[in-house]
Image (cartoon, helix red, strand yellow):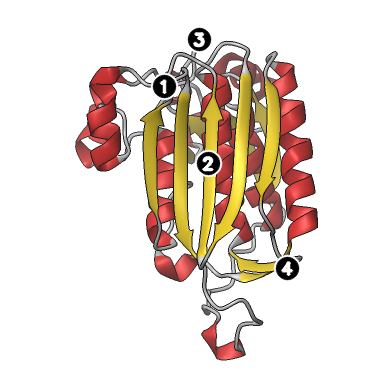
């Protein structure tokens, strides 16, 4: 399964302790925002039940991508996430005090929830595409706007199912994850969030993984040995991209030249992938 993609059978609502969920969300993003000079605030509007039946992983990923985008694409400013329940809907919004979306992009964002490919920064676009796929899988809809006072707001409206314990036969039946015990992985990705997520997934299925923030450090580790069983490379890292590392790797003597490689990319179309 590609990171950021989700189909309906891959999401599974379950009872979630909302105090724990909200506390984790606030602590994580207050710290992350402060590292770049931003100020994060979490607002819980109205009453939230003590327990809510939601897909916690999907909701965290949606909010994480939206908050991360707001921090990454704005100078130091306030970033606010708001969570509210209205009737049978879960309403999420993330707003900032930055320059807002360029007017030329608002039409495309409103229609397809994506920045035109020619206007994306290197490696950009993955966060919004991940949100789009997850929101669609949950039966919701996103909305973007520029605030009249300045800054941007992205909101998501998600339907809530019956708020009681799910019947055992209502939960999706998923195949067991692969067992990668004893496999050694090397990862190179300049995004701290992507490194954290990939490492969590790898360790969850038993793999040993070492992460590097750029291609040069990964190459040095490969030359120092011993070689891992698999490389995971971000296609478009600054400095030395994953594709450059791959080209270098194939010119090395065995066993480096034949190492299996998995490339991570924000491009979702076959034509864009073929052009890399």
Q: Earlier in the sequence, mark 1 or mark 2?
A: 2
| Extreme residue toward the left, this view | 271
Q: Position of residue 256 (x, y in %)?
A: 54, 30
Per the model, the C-alpha gap separating discs 1 and 3 is 38 Å
Dot 3, crowdedness within 10 Å: few (<14), some or many (≥20)?
few
Q: Quadrant of the C terminus?
A: top left
Indicate which label's residue lies in the foreground, 4 or 3. Answer: 4
Q: Secondary structure at mark 4?
A: strand
The residue that mark 4 highlights is: 51
Q: Secondary structure at mark 3?
A: loop
Residue 225 appears in the rendering = no
Per the model, the C-alpha gap separating discs 1 and 2 is 16 Å
Per the model, the C-alpha gap separating discs 4 and 2 is 20 Å
The residue closer to the viewer here, 68 or 10, is 68
The reply, left or right, for residue 18 in relation to residue 70 is right
Q: Which mark is residue 93?
A: 2
Per the model, the C-alpha gap separating discs 2 and 3 is 34 Å
Q: Position of residue 175 (x, y in %)?
A: 53, 74
Q: Say if 113 sits above or below 239 in the image.
A: below
The residue that mark 3 highlights is: 239
Q: Do tag 4 and tag 1 residues touch (Cβ < 8 Å)? A: no
């Amino acid at each position: 399964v590609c990171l950021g993609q989700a189909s309906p059978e891959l999401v599974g609502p379950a009872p979630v302790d909302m105090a724990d969920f909200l506390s984790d969300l606030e602590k994580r993003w207050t710290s992350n925002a402060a590292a770049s000079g931003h100020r994060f605030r979490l607002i819980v509007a109205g009453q939230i039940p003590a327990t809510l039946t939601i897909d916690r992983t999907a909701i965290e990923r949606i909010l994480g991508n939206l908050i991360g985008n707001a921090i990454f694409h704005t100078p130091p400013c306030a970033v606010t996430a708001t969570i509210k329940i209205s009737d049978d809907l879960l309403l999420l919004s993330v707003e900032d005090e930055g320059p807002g979306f360029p007017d030329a992009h608002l039409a495309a964002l409103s229609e397809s929830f994506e920045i035109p490919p020619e206007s994306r920064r290197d490696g950009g676009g993955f966060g919004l595409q991940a949100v789009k796929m997850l929101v669609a899988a949950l039966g919701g809809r996103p909305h973007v706007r520029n605030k009249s006072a300045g800054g941007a707001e992205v909101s998501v409206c998600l339907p809530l199912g019956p708020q009681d314990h799910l019947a055992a036969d209502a939960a999706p039946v998923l195949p067991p994850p692969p067992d990668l015990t004893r496999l050694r992985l090397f990862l190179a990705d300049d995004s701290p969030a992507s490194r954290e997520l990939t490492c969590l997934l790898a360790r969850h299925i038993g793999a040993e993984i070492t992460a590097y923030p750029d291609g040069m450090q990964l190459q040095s580790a490969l030359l120092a040995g011993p070689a891992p069983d698999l490389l995971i490379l971000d296609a478009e890292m600054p400095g030395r991209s994953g594709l450059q590392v791959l080209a270098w790797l194939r010119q090395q003597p065995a066993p480096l030249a034949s190492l299996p490689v998995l490339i991570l990319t924000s491009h979702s179309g076959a034509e864009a992938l073929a052009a890399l």
